[in-house]
Image (cartoon, rainbow, N blue to C red):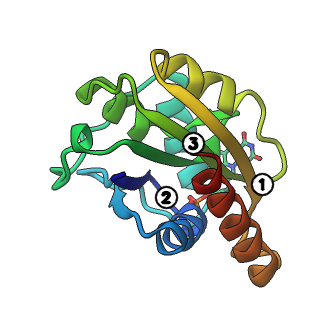
Amino acid sequence: MKKIVIFYSLDGNTRFIAENIAKTIDADLLELKLKKEINSKGFMKYFWAGKSVMTKANPELLPIDKNVQEYDLLVIGTPVWAFTYAPALNTFFEQNTIKNKKVALFCCHGGQKGPVFKKMKEALIGNEILSEIDFQEPLKNDHVKNIEKAEHWAENIIKSL
Ligand SMILES: Cc1cc2nc3c(=O)[nH]c(=O)nc-3n(C[C@H](O)[C@H](O)[C@H](O)COP(=O)(O)O)c2cc1C
């Protein structure tokens, strides 16, 4: 079974979890990167990033070097922005037809994940959603506990297949 962890991360939390999951289940890693990345320093990021969610923006991504169609299991991760997934994933979902895949979802947030998983599932209709899990700013909070949580979750997904 071919496995891939696909994610976007502005401040590194989602990347931190994605890397640990990929290592645990021996999956490839695909980081979605914006052609024009938001400056992650300072308060303005909330303005720009928040606006891009509200306007349902499809920001341009840098070219992707993986063919998602080759994979059986997709683990997809996002930071929570305004209670939903980051706009980079809008673009990814639009540019890649994801159907008949096994999918697991994770997110990183600051304490209010809202309906992020419901919205991801709506965008991923036609796939089998295996599991979902959220992490509260793992880089600021207990690293070790969050790594263990991510590893345990990822191992259980593989066991359930
Ligand atoms: C524009 C913006 C909107 C956010 N909206 C939310 C939110 O609705 N709920 C929440 O709990 N955290 C929110 N956050 C905090 C992030 O979800 C949190 O810091 C997350 O860990 C960031 O992941 P990253 O480091 O991978 O970018 C927001 C952050 C930004 C920049």
* Residue at mark 1: 110
Query: For the residue labelled by badge 2, is the local secondary structure a helix, a strand or a loop?
Result: loop
Q: What is the distance, in whole Å, between disc 3 and disc 2 at their CAs?
A: 17 Å
Left or right of 108? Residue 1 is left
**Residue 1, placed above or below residue 23:** above
| Residue found at x 64% / y 47% | 160
**Residue 94, placed above or below residue 21:** above
Query: Of discs 3 and 1, which sits in the foreground?
Result: 3
When asked about the image quadrant of residue 116, the answer is: top right
| Residue found at x 74% / y 81% | 143
Rendering coords of residue 126 (x, y %):
45, 16
Query: Of discs 3 and 2, which sits in the foreground?
Result: 3
* Residue at mark 2: 9
Is the C-beta separation of discs 3 and 2 under 8 Å?
no
Mark 2 lies within 8 Å of ligand 1 (Cβ measured): yes
When asked about the image quadrant of residue 42, the answer is: bottom right
The kind of residue tagged 1 is Gly
Task: From the viewer's side, name the closer residue of 40 and 158.
Answer: 158
Task: From the viewer's side, name the closer residue of 64 and 155.
Answer: 155
* Residue at mark 3: 104
